[in-house]
Image (cartoon, coloured by chain):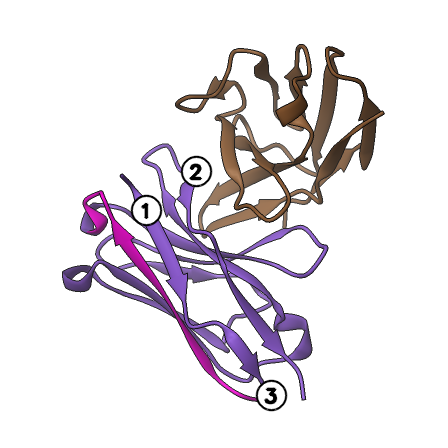
Amino acid sequence: EVQLVESGGGLVQPGGSLRLSCAASGFTFSSYSMNWVRQAPGKGLEWISYISSSSSTMSYADSVKGRFTISRDNAKNSLYLQMYSLRDEDTAVYYCASLLPEGWFDPWGQGTLVTVSS
Amino acid sequence: EIVLTQSPATLSLSPGERATLSCRASQSVSSYLAWYQQKPGQAPRLLIYDASNRATGIPARFSGSGSGTDFTLTISSLEPEDFAVYYCQRRSNWPTTWAFGQGTKVEIK
């Protein structure tokens, strides 16, 4: 069964840092590009970052560029999101999602909640 | 940046009725558009990709159409499990980015 499981969420103060992880199983992780998408409480979906299968290409939404870093470890079947300089508006459920060859997101993990608050 | 605008924000319908959801792009996205369904407390699920192709396991009552700037998701006859929020998504190839519309909630009338 294809599965993505996020972890690492929690409560962090404004200006703090946090590292999210996404563990993949049931498919050849190293062959697939990956993404992070977030959803603020009661709000819509926001794509925030992409990484290619070999880590050769990465991209970010303007809202997180310069503060967040996406990475992966294909040997560990894991995707990461390092978040720095966190702000109140970064409070959200963070999802990892695999990129289909057609260029769309499937499957998704169940999400991990990040709360930025003093 | 290409912005996606979904309408209506909320659609109130009864089971068995037809649902028509709209997604409009501020510039042409060709057929690079997908639709996702999200139920409360769950992750989104891919329904339609490349504007009109059903994803694996998606029932035939879901269909997508359109190209360029105007797209439609149609649910031919609403089942109880179809009441959810629906998002459209576009992608850009250079740079490699994606964006979502703000969502349409399909609620039970």
Image location of residue A84, percent across then percent down: 49, 82
| CA gap, disc 3 and disc 2 | 33 Å
The residue sitting at 48% across, 72% down in the picture is A9
Marks 2 and 1 close (CB-CB < 8 Å): no
Few, some or many C-alpha atoms within 10 Å of disc 2 (few <14, some 14-19, many ≥20)? Answer: many
Label 2: which secondary element? loop
User: Chain in purple?
Assistant: A
The magenta segment: A15-29
**Hue of chain B?**
brown
- The residue type indicated by label 3 comes to Gln
Residue B78 horizontal side relative to residue B42, left or right? right
Q: Is residue A114 visible?
A: yes
- The residue type indicated by label 2 comes to Trp
The residue sitting at 67% across, 42% down in the picture is B101
Q: Indicate which disc residue A104 carries.
A: 2
Q: Are marks 3 and 2 on the same chain?
A: yes
Label 1: which secondary element? strand
Residue assigned mark 3: A13
Image location of residue A31, percent across then percent down: 20, 46
| CA gap, disc 3 and disc 1 | 31 Å
Front of the two marks 2 and 1 = 1
Q: Indicate which disc residue A3 carries.
A: 1
Residue B67 horizontal side relative to residue B26, left or right? left
Image location of residue B76, percent across then percent down: 66, 10
Q: Nearer the viewer, residue A51 or A77?
A: A77
**Mark 3 vs 1, N-terminal side:** 1
Residue B78 horizontal side relative to residue B31, left or right? right
Q: Kindly indicate the quadrant of the structure image that contains residue A104.
A: top left
Front of the two marks 3 and 1 = 1
- Give the answer, above or below, for where A20 lies relative to B68: below
- Give the answer, above or below, for where B40 lies relative to B86: below
Q: Is residue A24 magenta?
A: yes
